[in-house]
Amino acid sequence: MFGRTFSDIGIDLGTCNTLIYIRGKGIVLNEPSMVALEKGTKKILAIGADAKPMQFKNPANIIVIKPLQEGVIADLESTEKMIRRFISKVMPRYRFIKPRMVIGIPSCITEVERRAVEESAYKAGAREVIVIEESLAAAIGAGIPIMEPAGHMICDIGGGTSEISVISLGGMVVSRAIRIGGDKFDDAIIRYVRSTYNLIIGGGVAERLKIEIGNAFPDIVIEKVEIKGTDAITLLPRRLEIDSVAVREALKEPITKIVEEIKATMGQTPAELNADIADRGICMTGGGSLLKGLDQLISKETGVPVFLAPEPLNCVALGAGKYFETFKGSARTDYDDLN
Ligand SMILES: Nc1ncnc2c1ncn2[C@@H]1O[C@H](COP(=O)(O)OP(=O)(O)OP(=O)(O)O)[C@@H](O)[C@H]1O
Ligand SMILES: [Mg+2]
């Protein structure tokens, strides 16, 4: 029984977070995709949740890196070690049962990087490894009936990338990805606060601002929060009260690019499938989709209804874990004996 339960593992190898889903157990790991290294020697000091508190607050001899940046593997060696560490963490006692692993990765990854991810999973003890596009995994995880002969649009806004795909009959009809996601939202806030208020803030403050009062669509309620940073002129600590209208202004540029990308994807989609999308709406997944009012903005700009997946942050891992059962017995395998 254990053999069955632990035989399929779904992994969302994200720029910001790595999640592991095991059939029958649910999400068993959810940690930041981060590695803390000793400068010079590159010795690993911490991985995942242990490395996160060191980010932004590290002394000079420690560097904290996100091995996957903007959806591409910036540091292959650290990525490999991170994957191996995470996998061994969730199955330390079951190493003798070799699992099948399905890993969701951004579609803009190169062939070399894809193979490196595969290799790391084999080294971590996989019996079989399948690497799939993150938006395909997201669609399965969102519960979308992807095997239907109908167009479904999925828009996964992660930390490093936004991937927009149209899926029908279990395959990608159109897929576009841009290297803009939640991390770029944070950068845009940092730049805006610096140029508008002469205040230097760090990535942690910018992310908090985005999550607390960030928004993409005008609302009657204007929210305010106090932030702290360094005055760009005096270089002394300073407080500032900032409101949601200012944060919306700050986020305008990266958000407009995502909206344009969605429109461009629709432009490449066959008319029949666009008709299905108009009926069914666009499904949004990924942490970036949680930005307040983003669904409303996309809906207004495209004229198509937009809905958020039930667990936007977990969809890729869930879908990767359910990959085998989704494709089992599908039209693709029914004719195997004739092929
Ligand atoms: N409530 C929220 N509002 C706005 N942004 C949010 C919210 N919660 C999380 N985020 C942002 O979502 C991003 C992380 O999302 P997610 O975990 O889906 O990314 P990822 O899968 O690691 O990245 P990628 O898919 O690009 O590789 C971060 O930028 C985070 O700040
Ligand atoms: Mg993701």
Image: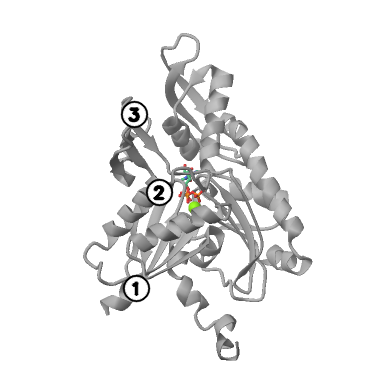
Task: Give the residue type at disc 1.
Answer: Ser
Mark 1 or 2 closer to N-term?
A: 1
Q: Position of residue 319 (x, y in %)?
A: 47, 65
Q: Which mark is residue 204?
A: none
Question: What is the CA distance from the residue labelled 3 to the residue labelled 2?
Answer: 22 Å
User: In the image shown, does 10 or 40 lie closer to the viewer?
Assistant: 40
Q: Given the image, on which type of amino acid does mark 3 rest?
A: Lys
N-term mark: 3 or 1: 1
Question: At which x and y percent is residue 210?
Answer: 50, 37
Q: Residues within 10 Å of mark 3 (few under 14, many from 20)?
A: few
What residue appears at the point 62 percent right and 55 percent down from the top-left corner? 164
Q: Residue at x 58, y 49 (%)?
A: 162
Q: Helix, strand, or loop for circle 2?
A: helix
Give the Cα distance between marks 1 and 2. 23 Å
Q: Residue visible at 28% across and 72% down?
A: 97
Residue that mark 2 sits on: 79
* Residue type for callout 2: Thr
- Mark nearer the viewer, 1 or 2: 2
**Disc 3 marks which residue?**
57
Residue at the outermost top position: 234
Q: Is residue 26 left or right of residue 213?
A: left
Q: Nearer the viewer, residue 258 or 133?
A: 133
Dot 1 and dot 2 residues touching (CB under 8 Å): no
Estimate the x, y position of residue 153 in percent, counting from the top left.
Answer: 64, 62
Which residue lies under the disc numbered 1? 7
Q: Give the Cα distance between marks 3 and 1.
A: 40 Å
Q: Is residue 63 above or below residue 135?
A: above
> The C terminus lies in which quarter of the figure?
bottom right
- Residue 76 in sight: yes
Is residue 311 in view from this perspective? no
Residue 279 vertical placement versus 3 (above, below): above
Precedes in sequence: disc 3 or disc 2 = 3
